[in-house]
Image (cartoon, rainbow, N blue to C red):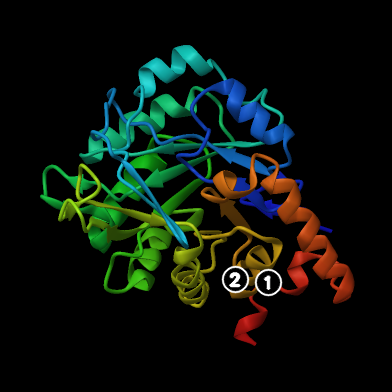
Amino acid sequence: MLGVNLCGIRLKNPTILASGILGIAKESVDRVGKSGAGAVTLKSLCHEERLGYNNPAIVVFEKGMLNAIGLSGQGIDNALKDFKRLDDVSVPVIGSIFGYRTEDFAYVARQMSKLKPAMIEIDISCPHVDYGKPICSDKDLTAEITRAVKKNTKLPVSIKLSPNVSDIREIAHAAERAGADAITAINAASGMAIDINARKPILANKIGGVTGPALKPIAVRCVYQIYETVKIPIIGTGGVTYGKDAIEMVMAGATAVGIGTAVYYRGINVFKKVCDEMQQWMKKNKVKNLEQIRGVAHR
């Protein structure tokens, strides 16, 4: 009932752990898989070790979270030693990568492929050092990075897009034309919180990424628009907390759904809970499989 095919990868259900949540050690990755996720995305890795931003780095508000972790991580070469391989985990693993130059992405893709994940996800939210602007907002840079990664791996590649752009459709189209196999939509939206007593921004970095339920309407809109623009599958990510949210993403056009912040709200079993809620809705509405409702909001 819930099984899906994502770029030739068979998932037992459409829920995928989003990058940045629990995907740090092999043990936690395997644990998430055994807790019900259809696939697991690693925390993003680049060519070097990164310490990230100072605290405070997370703010919890009524409808979500605001974080500025700064893509902290051990770096791909250290990850090779720690993970060794990823094809023996209980569910398919997606390796998330980022960089600051085109050659960074190429190198990390090459190294990540040695771990044998099922797929590679490219995070293009960081500024490109050589061009001085975020990759995510430039269709030509997006295409350049996509081509570089595709040349350095035989694995399916998904591009994780940012909502902080003027037209996400043209970025998605550029990625598809450059050879992307899928689109992950979306990354966090840009936001800020101010301590009214201290009279200054709460986050050490001042600006952070909005995640959780507050992001969902934006994510659904982006998935809807991208579905009308490209023919490759979409991983709908952003604010999915309950089964009804996942159904909404599928109706907008998503093949699979990413779950991140909801782990904090509903625990590591959130994947099973979401799947159970999806099945209950499907049985009630006489829907046999997700293909029946994928993109139905466009009809």
Instruction: Name the spot of residue 25 as percent of width and height, x first.
Output: 52, 23
Instruction: Name the spot of residue 248 as percent of width and height, x first.
Output: 63, 71
Q: Can residue 218 be spotted in the picture?
A: yes
Q: CA distance from mark 2 to mark 1?
A: 5 Å
Instruction: Name the spot of residue 105 as percent of width and height, x first.
Output: 31, 37
> Crowding at label 2, few (<14), some or many (≥20) Cα neighbours within 10 Å?
many
* Residue on which the image places disc 1: 294
Which image quarter holds the N terminus?
Answer: bottom right
Relative to 282, is 297 on the left or the right? left
Relative to 232, say whether 261 is above or below: above
Residue type beneath disc 2: Gly
Query: In what element is the residue under mark 2?
Result: loop
Instruction: Name the spot of residue 154 as percent of width and height, x first.
Output: 50, 37
Residue that extends furthest to the bottom in the rendered view of this protein: 299
> Crowding at label 1, few (<14), some or many (≥20) Cα neighbours within 10 Å?
some
Residue that extends furthest to the top in the rendered view of this protein: 81
* Residue on which the image places disc 2: 253
Callout 2–callout 1 Cβ contact below 8 Å: yes
Nearer the observer, 202 or 42: 202
Residue type beneath disc 1: Arg
Relative to 30, say whether 288 is above or below: below
Which image quarter holds the C terminus?
Answer: bottom right
